[in-house]
Image: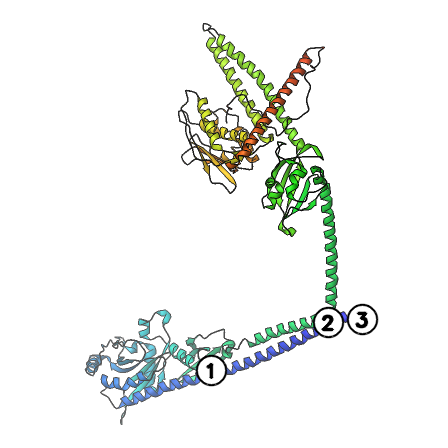
Amino acid sequence: MNGAQRATGPLLSVFVLLTGLIATVLSAAALYSAQRDTATREMSQRHEMALRAIRSETERYHRLLETLAAGLVNDPDLTWEEWDGATAPLADARLMGAASVAYLVPVRTEDVEEAQRLWRDRGATVTLHPDPALTEHYFGVYVRYLDDSEAVNPSGADGAANALLAQTLAKARDNREMVVSDAYVLARDRRDVPAAEQQKSFILAVPVWAPGNTPHFQAWVTSSLRLGDFLSDILIKVSERQISGELLSVNADGTRHQVAGWEGPGSPDLHRSDLIRVGDRDWILETHGDFRHLVGSGWYLPVVVLAGGLILTGLLAWQVHVLATGRARARAQVEAATAGLREAEGKSRRQAELLGAIMTTISDGVTVVGSRGELLLENPAARRLLGVKERPDGPQQWQEHFGVFRPDGRTPFPLEEMPLIRALGGESTDGVEVIIRNPGRPEGMLLSIDGRPLDPSAGEHGAVAVCRDVTELRRYETDLSIFAGVVAHDLKAPLSTARGLAELVLEDVPDGWPESAEIRDGLRRIVQAVDRMDGLIETMLAYTTARHAPLRAVAVDPAAMVREIIDERIVGLGPDRPAPEWSLEPLPAVRADPAMLRHVLDNLIGNAMKYVRPGGTPRVEIAAGTAEPGMARIEVADSGIGIPDDDKPHIFETFHRTAAAAGYSGTGLGLTICQRIVQRHGGEIGVADNPGGGTRFWFTLPAADLSEEPEMSSTDNSAADDEDAVRAALERALAERAAMMEAASLSGLVMPPGVVPSDEPAPGRLRAPIPERRHQRQD
């Protein structure tokens, strides 16, 4: 039963669709057939109208020419004034296609001069030009132009020279009736009209015979008819430009030639043809019409009916189908929606369980708070890292409740600088380090916290923080720095001994030895090699600490640091080097590690003073540049040897040196160290050509406000404390290593009881060891 009900709807809609299609097609076909019949009748009517118009117009030509000829019979001494008066009605008649009407007279060769004098006396302005090959000539002595062309004097050409015209005139004289010539182009048109615009024309000739007992021939009255103008005027008048047509002439030899044509609109699909008798000639009129234009503006109605019927039929069938199958479809939609909801619910539940498992499993602590600081979500790792199970009522109690301190372990962390509070204000933070010390964490733990505003898709305003334990990482960095200091000390101690011995020997070399100069040169080379090795060790130590040494970013005024560096560099140049020219523009305050910032500035300024063409004076310009919001840009420009464009993309790579720098000392690590330091501060560094010659290095760092100076001073004190602690740890490590080496070299002795290896890391954040020499060699 259910199957039959489900099939009823589609079957009913198919029945409605087929019925509508059949009715629509039959209606459109009937309408098209009716329009086709209407167009056929219209075509026949317009064709008949064109036939009647052509017959009527040619008969009018015939009557007017015969009337004119009859009027001239009784006037053997016809003058120009009489001719002009007799032909004036023809000009007013507006004959379709008529070009001119002329009065032609026959003249024998021996009578040409007398005939010319005679007709000039009667008012003609013609000069006769007989064809010498003929004995009888036909001259048009009077001509009236019936078209809009400018009236000119008769040419005096011999009409007998035109075989077609001569044949027509002779036949008219012999038959004593109007004769129509074959189609040809008028001499006047061949002379005055471009070839593309020339038309075929007919000559209608009517003979003039003088009455009497012995009638004699006087002349011909001829009229030229341009068939193209004639046919177009006829069809435009009777068909209103709806049909096209051709006029065919049946010549005396029986051949047919199209002598005129008119192109109507569209693509003709209806045709008619009929014979017309004009004088002694047969013309054939063929007309053509386009069904769409003959029907008029409603030719598209069958198409509209067909399209509209199909659309209405489709809509009706669809509506019947919808109504017939609505209940079943609604039930299926409900079932599908219910299944989709169940699937979505299951998927959401699985995603929630997966998210819960991830939050429970990860070792990083995740905390989410609402717009007022209330706790929304906290994973077990966050509770474990913070060491306190109870949660405070509001953000004002966070510092005291959790024991949040700055990395120095003594200064309470301000509430407004906490990552969650900054994230609630729309600011993202990364790597904010705090010390957590509370009853659950009495030994203290160093945490690194990232804060972000909560994504709006969560549906409410809030913030999320992710914290991780970096205590062991900082201890590792401290040990690494101590190790680097020990290695540097162990490498530099033999070098200091070698340098001292070389200098002592250099002072004791006698002047009288033949090899004294060679020995002194070798000793100086040793001293220079030791200095280069010492600089390389310091550079490698800086290269290591630039990546791993902790950052202590504070507000720094780089202008004061630049002045100090330039003063020290000028003192270190020596008396044999020209004093550099330098300029310093106001620089913005930046947030950076002072020691690392000094290294970057010292390296760039040192390079600007070192890479100078031989004999040239170093020129250094330090200025501020335009940077993106929140950043400050510092530029160091020189007028030195410059950097080729091919080397610019690789200038910050490790150990990369340009070909032009081959004659200058350096390790190829200085710019690499600068890049590491700048990138660790979240900035960028680059190089470009200096418009005045040389090179312009630039770097960006986070901008700062010098109003933070109280924080800066406290931090600097902490940094000094950290450096003292690092030095103490370094001295302990060196003492332990010396004791172990002495114990290993003397049998029976053990490590002195006063030297006990210590596993206690240096407190606070570790800084790079401070080298003994004030100036480092620069790349």
Q: Residue furthest right?
A: 1
The label number, if any, that marks residue 480 in the structure image: none
Q: Amino acid at mark 1?
A: His
- Within 10 Å of disc 2 (Cα), the crowding (few <14, some 14-19, many 20+) is some
* Residue 67 image-quadrant placement: bottom left
The label number, if any, that marks residue 47 in the structure image: 1
User: 228 or 545: which is nearer to us?
Assistant: 545
Return the x and y of residue 336 as percentages of the image width and height.
73, 61
Left or right placement of residue 501 versus residue 166 in this view: right
Residue at the spot 75% in from the left edge and 72% down from the top edge:
8
Residue at the spot 70% in from the left edge and 74% down from the top edge:
15
Foreground disc of the pair 3, 1: 3
Q: CA distance from mark 3 to mark 1?
A: 69 Å
Classify mark 2: helix, strand or loop. Answer: helix
- Within 10 Å of disc 1 (Cα), the crowding (few <14, some 14-19, many 20+) is many
Left or right placement of residue 280 versus residue 463 in this view: left
Return the x and y of residue 328 as percentages of the image width and height.
74, 67
According to the picture, the residue beneath numbered tag 3 turns out to be 1
Q: Are marks 3 and 1 in contact (CB under 8 Å)?
A: no
The mark tally for this picture is: 3
Return the x and y of residue 295 as percentages of the image width and height.
51, 79
Q: Amino acid at mark 3?
A: Met
According to the picture, the residue beneath numbered tag 2 turns out to be 9
Q: Earlier in the sequence, mark 2 or mark 1?
A: 2
User: 151 or 79: which is nearer to us?
Assistant: 151
Q: Are marks 2 and 1 in contact (CB under 8 Å)?
A: no
Q: Are marks 3 and 2 in contact (CB under 8 Å)?
A: no
Whether residue 118 can be seen here: yes
Foreground disc of the pair 2, 1: 2
Q: Amino acid at mark 2?
A: Gly
Q: Earlier in the sequence, mark 3 or mark 2?
A: 3
Classify mark 3: helix, strand or loop. Answer: loop
